Image (cartoon, rainbow, N blue to C red):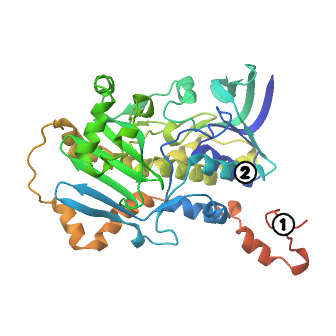
Amino acid sequence: MGKKTTVAVVGGGPAGMVLGLLLARAGIEVTVLEKHADFLRDFRGDTVHASTLTLLDDLGLGERFAALPQRRLDRVAAQLDGGLVQIADMSRLPGAHKHVALVPQWDFLDLLADAAAEEPSFTLVREADVTGLLAEQGRVTGVRWTDRATGQEQELTAALTVACDGRHSAVRAAAGLRTRGFGVPMDVWWFRLPRRADDVPGGLGRFTAGHFCVLIDRGDYWQCAYMIRKGSDAQLRAQGIGELRRRMVALVPWLGDRVDTLESWDEVKLLDVRLDRLRRWYARGLLLIGDAAHAMSPVGGVGINLAVADAVAAARILAPELRRDGTASTRALRRVQLRRWWPTALVQGGQRLAHRAVLGKALDADPATPPPSTGRLPFLVRVAQRFPVLQAVPARLVAIGPLPERAPGWARRAPAREAARSLPDGERTVGGDGGRSA
């Protein structure tokens, strides 16, 4: 049983949904294949960065996004052995958005899906598990997929297939593409602890010899990321959940009144950290973006930001050819990689440096017998405390990043309130139709 589309997007995450929305606004027939029935899953990457917030404004979705339940992170602090210090001050960012928004990712994806559904050329197929690629004369011509609800196998032919299906990309495997891996020193345990009203607001990192933990303020709970030596998960779990409780109390003593809420290892999820990059992000009829092309370390929490930027660049570069010829040339696919390769390599280079210079050394130490502290802050941290304007540098690297992408003109829309004001009085509508005339 086969169907046809112009662009098949595999994966309904941030990159896939943004790409689908933008191409649909160009009038291009696009079908997004999402493996799950809905977006209600336990994501850990729930950050929407300042550059993505600006993109939502361009798309006329800023007001809708602002209405979602969210927390705003405008400062990042670190608890070092020498004291509590502020690392990044996002109030110094340029533009309207001087923060990172913490929003449940399912709400963000639902917003994008609803906006895309307003475009007649957009289709979202849920419970579509892509199992292989279609090809003719060395060119990818679509995908094979299984309907997880019925078990029925189907085919979708397409002029262009775009893989947005993450670091374990089925499309990448089916195409036989191999990544270049960069060693990482850690994996991450993700779990939640209750948050009190008088706790430190915003994001907090706690660093010391043998320990590294990040706490993300989610309102009534802390989203906790505790880093462990790569490959040590099974060994540490064998010591019982009490070992994690003990480590957290030693690291952040004021959490001691709530660590007992961690009752079992079932509440602790392992993130198998990867840092890799494809040498070539494309083949004839096929493009890979986001984590499918370059898996990012959690350092800086910038993976979603880069994936969304990939999608915007791909839409801007490919849409003219797709509208004109109904296909995308290999030359155009190469241009997407050339555009997005250097910001990706730059960020990954910074992450590799952090792994070697900070995380690897810290995790090599025995947390049970940390070395005595001098109480003296690292040099760069001391400089940033003395000259707070320098805190804008890490804020910009995280919240905006290198080479932020803006929406192309043909994809932009005025906010609903602005659009309604621009209509003549007789054409304004009252009610829930989003400001469109009847």
Label 1 secondary element: loop
The residue labelled by disc 2 is 114
Q: Residue at x 70, y 68 (%)?
A: 415
Q: Nearer the viewer, residue 240 or 385?
A: 240
- CA distance for labels 1 and 2: 18 Å
Q: Residue at x 68, y 24 (%)?
A: 134
Q: Is residue 62 above or below residue 230?
A: below
Give residue 260's position: percent from left, percent from top.
36, 39
For the N terminus, the image quarter is top right
Q: Nearer the viewer, residue 410 or 437?
A: 437
**Do we see residue 137 in this rendering?**
no
Q: Left or right: where does residue 43 sit relative to residue 32?
A: left
Q: Residue at x 86, y 79 (%)?
A: 424
Question: What amino acid is found at the position of numbered circle 2 in the picture?
Answer: Asp
Mark 1 vs mark 2: which is more N-terminal? 2
Mark seen at residue 431: 1
Tell me whether the residue at label 1 lies in contact with that at label 2, contact meaning CB atoms closer than 8 angstroms. no
Q: Is residue 177 above or below residue 22?
A: above
Question: What amino acid is found at the position of numbered circle 1 in the picture?
Answer: Gly
Give residue 14's position: percent from left, percent from top.
58, 47
Q: What is the crowding at mark 1: few (fewer than 14 residues within 10 Å), some, or many (at least 20)?
A: few
